[in-house]
Image: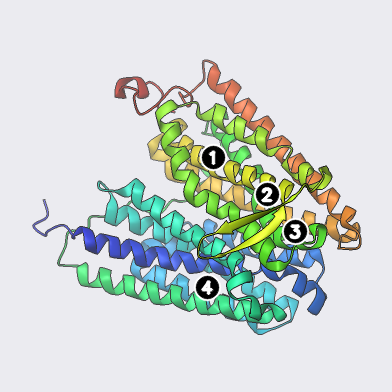
Amino acid sequence: MSALPQPSSFYRWMVLLFVSLAMFGNYYIYDSLWPIVDLLREQRDFSYQQIGWLSTAYNIAALCVLLLGGYIIDRWGTKKAITLFALICLVAAALTAFSPNFETMFAGRFMLGLGAEPLIVAATTVLAKWFKGKELSFAFGINLSISRLGSASADWSTGFASPLYVNWQDPLWLATAVAGISVTAAILYWILERRAEGRYDLGTADSTDKLEFKSLYSFSASYWYIVALCVVFYATVFPFRSFAIDYFQQAHGLDREAAGILSSLLPVAAIIATPLFGLWVDRVGKRALFMAAGSLVMLPLFLMVTYLPAGPDVNIMIPFIGSAVVPLTLLLVILLLGMVFSLIPAVMWPSVAYIVDSRRLGSAYALMTFCQQIGWAIVPLAVGYLNDIYLAGPDNINGYTPGMWFYTALASLGLYFSYKLWRTEQGPGGHGLDSITTKTPVVAAEQHPG
């Protein structure tokens, strides 16, 4: 037993605050590119496929980092690692904003992936060390909410920083300034942990999740159905967000501020609804059924924005941010997509813990994330290519239709995989995804070790 006292609650929450602010900057930088898609096309003559490559560059870097298996975090420790990765994100943001050359911007987005993805892993490791055995789930929820607030803030910048949007470069310099906040927060976390060492019993965190291909064949069919759903779900929602503000402007005639507010409803919904869905599912079970229901709701949404009448204009208002007038159909579709964006991740990621042996859980999550990044890397290129060859633009809004059908095809695959998961879990090889709840006795839960 350690003779050192436990850190105070205030000290732990200060650590959470600074780590979450570092993550806030990380998310803001990533999403800062999407409100200027039209400016890059008009002022730099970028094609939609080049925009897709700027998205894919991040994922390619993330795949490289995952293959390293968290070596830097385990070797250097979290306080050095988070500061290093935050500095990499700062340099990446500045490089993206500095040059109008496509290759330089590509390098900046690639560098962002090298810093941002391991920063997420390092932040998770920090929270596990400081909050294990205490308010860990709540701390993770707060961290994720603050992080996604960074995504929403990048969308809201079309309003509070609207004077910057006369050119493509100034919004990216704003993102670089936000990256500076991220670095400052990382340094403050370093100082806090440095002061705590030798004064408090900090405990230890588990080693960083490693990607082990030797585990490839040791997982059950249910695990692979969840991985497949994860791939097509994120490969649908995140690329759609990448092009959403531009799509709302070009195909539906919204101004930049209204398009930004409408797009921000996705991360805002996730901030509010994801923990609520998580609590609900823990109480009632039915995890495979919920994933199938979410996939079914998502299936028609991209065709609805394409073919349904726009409907009457309605006013939406986000307190302290602004208001916008948007077509009713677009609003309903984004709200439904926000519900799906909250429900499926809230159920999908925890479900892995029910069907994989705890000794292989780190490898299972790392492998799932690796597959996720592959799908996420491919789809922006495909959608950009479709937009280009069909000459999508305000003078030819039908040119966006093939891309919407592509998203729909991915959503249909998600429905198929979630249905297969539900059927498997109803059979003798099920793991209890639909039956285990917070009211389930421990003995019953242990009958499904995975």
Q: Which mark is residue 230?
A: none
Quadrant of the drawing holding the C terminus: top left
Find the distance from the CA under tag 2 to the CA under tag 1. 18 Å
Residue for badge 1: 343
Going 14% across and 67% down the picture, which residue do you hit?
199
Residue for badge 3: 248
Query: In the rendered view, does 337 fall on the left or right side of 149?
Result: right
Going 74% across and 38% down the picture, which residue do you hit?
300
Residue type (three-letter) at the residue carrying disc 4: Cys
Q: Earlier in the sequence, mark 4 or mark 3?
A: 4
- Compared to residue 310, the image places residue 121 above or below, namely below
Residue for badge 4: 89
* Mark nearer the viewer, 4 or 3: 3
Q: Secondary structure at mark 2?
A: helix
Where is residue 402 shown, x and y percent of the image?
A: 85, 49
Q: Secondary structure at mark 1?
A: helix
